[in-house]
Structures are given as structure tokens and as C-alpha cells.
Amino acid sequence: MRVELIKTYKSVHTWTGILAGLFLYIAFVAGALTMFKGPLNQWALQPETTLPSISVEKYDSLITEVLQAHPEAAKRMTVHLPLAGLQVAPVSWEIEDEVTHDHTLWYASFDGNGKLITQSFTVSAIGEFVDHLHRTGGIPGGEGHDAFGTYVLGVVAALYFIALVSGLIIFLPTWFKDLLVLRKGKNRKRYWLDFHNVLGITSLPFHLVIAFTAFVFAFHDPLYDALRVTAYGDSPMFTRPAPQEVKSFSELVPIAELETAIQEWESKFQMAEILYINLDTRSPRMRVGGIMHGEVVRGAEYAYVLGNPYLSEIPYSSFMPSNFNGYSGTVMSIFSLHFGSFGGNAVRWVYFVLGIMGALIFFTGNLLWIESRRKKRRAQGALPVQTTSSMVMARLTVGVGLGTILGIAASMLAVKWLPHAQVDIEFWQKTTYYTGFLFAVAWAFVRRPMAAARQLLVFCAAAIFLIPISSLIKGELLGAATQVWAVDFVALLIGVSLALLSVHLRKRQAKIEPDSVWSEVVESPVTESSIPTPLPNTHPQASS
């Protein structure tokens, strides 16, 4: 391949990576954690914001009593069965204020005497917050599909795809020589390049899938709007069932009968939750979410069945694996490949590791860019004075990289210690994240990059160690579910890793060259008159 062409692709790879790298780092760290957002949510639950669980046989009675006592729940009510990922209460519903449009969540269950109890409170869904960071890169503004950061991440995903393809083209000429090679030595640029290449090549299919699916998700609504105008015109995109007579809540299909009907169709389907919509209208709907181990499914956790809650006959649904066709199979594959929801916990752990590897790819890419600037200045005979661009990139890499970790840890500590029933916990989990994140970025610009990295690693390790310590102090580990123990154990491992990394950086400090941005030697201003004139070489051995 021509050298000029390689240089062009290298330039494309470098600048697309630089422009997208910091946003993608946040997205990948948060994305790795969202593989276990169910356990994260369960870890954050507090006794005062949970209601008693009930046996499956009592669900039908509870649903009927809730709808009779609170008919407003008919608009949108969710039934959380024992297999649901988050066990707050058996039933919940949402009420929207017609004036302010604020949403209030209510929960219901039976007490020990079988009497209906209802309560309104806010549950800290820390897993959903981390997922929001994953989808927006932490960029504030808007919610859901309308979040500003979602569209920014969509553009970033396109740059990310270009960076992947151009990086692969650069690597092709030395494929066999450099494949999985990691050379240590004085040449730090070569080491970081090898590490960057190993991470990229070993996880390339995963990254291509994530880049493509992230773009599709970001522009999902605009793509559907364009399709509606260009392909469907006046015809509806989806066929809606014909209106029916308004029925009594007592005529809802019993849960056991509903599960039997679905399992006759999909034997692997295990019901976890039911979303009822508009039960008191002529167009009632339900969406049943269930676990299907080892299958390609529509959601991040569940496969879905859509139907009429008053009819036990389950209509044809392209959401189910047995009914996949070319189009629906492609759509389901996009969702499942992005969510890692096709192989149970084993695949989730693989995706977790790949997510961390992805974050390291962008981190090492920034280190390569910084090191390349130093090599270029050396070739030009420049003295060891850092350029502004190299210093800014080093500070941003440290601040954003460790700020993301510190912010998430601070958010988790806030939801663990603040009383959910007395404060706006959603506000505080956001506030503590951005406080930790911005503090780390500011600290990286106040201190020298390497000093800031070591100190922020200590801050991050301390904050993460407080996660399992908090559970221990609050006495929540005794009798806790396995997933709660797992969150604390993984936090402990991450904290130890960060502490060891801080120690390693301190030991390595003496070996850092003075013309590196990671050096802690403060340069004095350099002028032309301050450059020493080289003495003539008169030593006989040196001249020989």
C-alpha cells in the first residue's frame, strides 16, 4: 500500500479518534456497568422504599384491588413478578400532573394481614442513571430519546466507525508481524501503540457492532419519521387492533392463564413483568416482558409479547424468536447485539470486559497522540518544553478518565446514604456525579498531569472502597441477595486495582523523561538566547 495513502488513513484515524475518544470513554465505562444495572438498582434499594413481596397466586387479587381503589392506575400500571430484576413492590403505576406534567410513582402490595397498602416514593434507579450516562456521554439536556447527548453520541458513533475502519487499514500492512505483539522497552510510543492495537484487533467485531447500533439507536426516531414519509405515506406503519367495548377490570386475563398461553407458543418464556396501558378505554394494551435464556430478544433484559389484556389468545408478534423474519430478525439482532442480552450472565460478563477494553482503547489512543507530539518535537530538535495542545490533552485524558469513575462512585455513595423517602434522590445522584466529574477535571488542570493522575487515583480508590464499606456499616450484607454481594465485591476489586495503579505510577515517576508531559519537572520559558551553544568536539575518543 502506498505510503501517502497510509498517512492519509492515519490522519483520519487520529482525528476521528481524538474528536470521539473522550465521549466514547465515558460511554464505554458506563456501558460496561449497565450490563448489571439490575444488581445495581437492587443494591441501592432502601427498606423504607420497598413494600412486602407476595406469592404469585395473590397477584390477580392485588391488581383488581389496586384498580378499584385507584382507577387512575388503569392508564399505565406495571406488575413486577418474582423474576423481575428490581423488587420494590409487586405493583406500581404512574400519575402525571395535568398542569406541571410532573410524574408521581405509586406502589402497592398486601400487608401481613392481606390488606391493600399503597405508598408513593422515589426509588433510586442508579442503574438507569448509569445507562443514561452511557447513552449521552454525560452531556446534560433532555431526557429519553430527546436527550441532546444521545444525538451527539450518534454523531460520535459515526466518527468511531470511521476511526475503526481507518485503523484497520493502517494495521493491515504489518498484520502478521504486529498481531498480538506487546513490546516493552524505552520506546514508550511503541509500547502504547502495541497495547492500543492488541485491544483494538481482539475486540474489533464487538466495536463495529457497537458503533453501528449506537448510530441507529441515536437516530431511531428521525429514521422512522423519514421511513414513514418516504415509504408509507398515508398508510400506517403498524396495524392497530380494532377498538372494543370498555370492559370491567375483573375481566383481565389471570396471570397464570396468560403465562400458559405464552408458553404454549414460546416454551422458554418466563414472565417477569406486565405493563398494562389504557385498561379503561376501547384500546387497552399490554406488554409482557419475560426472560428467555440463550435467545436473541428485543430488550436489554427481556423478550416482549404484545397483546390485549382482556384476551388470552396471544396475537402474532414479530418480537418473539419463533416468528423472526428477515426484517424483524435484523432489528432484533441489532438490539440484542448491542445489549448483550442473548447469552445470560456469561455474555454480560464478556460485554463488561469488552466495555472496559473499549474505554482503554480511547485512553491509549490519547496517550499515543501525546507521545507522537513529543517524538515530532524531538525530530525538530526542540527543547523539552510542552506544547499547549499536548498539555491540554493530557489534562483532559486524566480528568475525564478518572472523573467518570469518581463521579459514578460518588453517585452510588449518595444513593446509599441519602434517605430516598425524604430527598429528591434523582437530583442528588446527578448532582454528586457531576460534582465528582468536574472536580476531577478541575484538579487535572490545577496540578501537573502525572501528579493529578496519582492523586485522583487515590481519590477514586477511596470512594470505591467506601461502596462495600457502606453496605457493611449499614448492615445490608447479612441476608442480602447474591447480586448485592457481587456489586460490593466487584467494587472492592476495582478499588484495589486503582490503588495498585497509583503505587505503580509513583514508582515509575523517576524513569519519566523530562520532555514528557508526564514529567513533574516545571519548564522555564525558553528563548533563543537561552539555548546553549554546543562546544566543539575535541575529545579524540569522541571524534573517533
Image: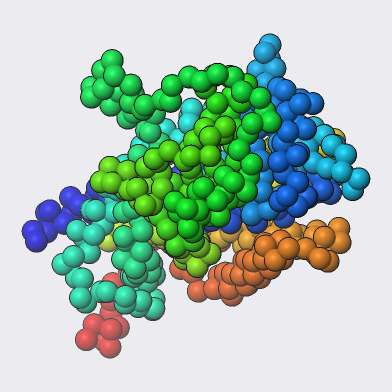
Query: Residue 159's x, y, as percent?
Result: 32, 43
Say which quarter of the image contains residue 251: top right
Residue in the image at 20% along x and 75% along y: 176
Residue with the most extreme left position: 2
63 vs 387, left or right, is: right
Residue in the image at 89% along x and 48% along y: 112
Is residue 120 shown above or below 79? above
Say which quarter of the image contains residue 205: bottom left
Viewer-side residue, 429 vs 297: 297
Which quadrant would the C terminus be assigned to in this image? bottom left
Viewer-side residue, 511 vs 215: 215
Residue in the image at 70% along x and 17% along y: 97
Looking at the image, can residue 441 be seen? no
58 vs 133, left or right, is: right
Which quadrant would the N terminus be assigned to in this image? bottom left
Query: Residue 79's x, y, as percent?
Result: 66, 41
Viewer-side residue, 243 vs 102: 243
Residue in the image at 88% along x and 39% along y: 115
Looking at the image, can residue 172 be seen? yes
